[in-house]
Amino acid sequence: MPTFCPRCFWLKSHLKLPFQIFPGIFASIDSYSKKVTNVFWEHRDRLPDWFAEFGDLERPVPTPHHSKFFVVDEVTGVRLTGVPDEIIRRADGSFFIVDYKTAKFTGHQDQLLPMYDVQLNVYAYIGNRYGFTPVTGLGLVYYEPLTVLGEEDLAKIVGERSFVMPFAPRLLPLELRPNELVPPLLVKAVEILRQERPPKGRRDCQDCRCLDELVRVLVMDAC
């Protein structure tokens, strides 16, 4: 990420920081997105129509647990692991890796693309060594919530004791370059994490400023 801060990375990796909350609803939506693809396949024997934008995809295959889907990097010794949202077999026997994002595709998502780019290339890096060989494509599927509601929509959206929110898919192919992206980042991560003390932070890092202010307040309180 352009905003990457070595100091914050070191602190997050070495300390259990407070004030971190991740609402469970996002995990539920993520799980539901996967079920949409797999239940559709089970009952229709094909993928939902919007996947056609990614090319000739055939069927989803079981995604390994993170305890199995990993590699140990020979150069750094780092154990690299993760869980792809979807691994899909192509007509030629190769594999396409998909990650679902529940969000509107806006400028904010554009800012996060470097992180998503590495995330999916990491899955490809592991997949090529795990047995999903070869990985020949990567893509993001943004499921955008459709929040504009008119009177004509009520009958199909609102029930007696429930309501539904429709989502519209937006697909974004990513460049496949795992061997180019992943090894240098592993080396950089190890160089930072093996330091005994946190390195100097990025000059304009807001998190560093907040942390320094927190430390200042704690010191004043202790005095």
Image (cartoon, helix red, strand yellow):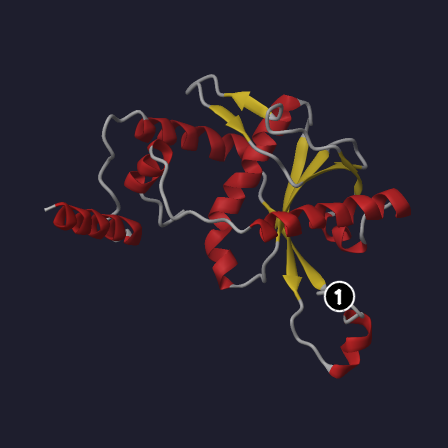
Q: Mark 1 highlights which residue?
A: 162
In this view, the residue farthest toward the left is 223
Residue 12 in picture, x, y percent from top left:
36, 38
In this view, the residue farthest toward the right is 44
Residue 223 in picture, x, y percent from top left:
9, 46
Q: 10 Å neighbourhood of mark 1: few (<14), some, or many (≥20)? A: few
Q: Is residue 195 left or right of residue 171?
A: left
Residue at (23, 50) in percent of width and height: 214
- Relative to 166, is 10 above or below? above
Q: Is residue 223 left or right of residue 167?
A: left
Residue at (72, 81) in percent of width and height: 150
Q: Is residue 159 left or right of residue 176?
A: right
Callout 1 amino acid: Ser
- Relative to 158, is 198 above or below? above
Residue 14 in picture, x, y percent from top left:
34, 31
In this view, the residue farthest toward the bottom is 151
Q: Which image quadrant for residue 199?
A: top left
Residue 45 visible in rendering: no
Q: Nearer the viewer, residue 100 or 132?
A: 100
Residue 189 in picture, x, y percent from top left:
37, 31
- Relative to 85, is 192 above or below? above
User: What secondary structure is found at the residue carrying circle 1?
Assistant: loop
Q: Nearer the viewer, residue 96 or 38?
A: 38
Report how many numbered discs are placed on residues in the image.
1
Residue 199 visible in rendering: yes
Q: Nearer the viewer, residue 143 or 114?
A: 143
Residue at (75, 82) in percent of width and height: 151
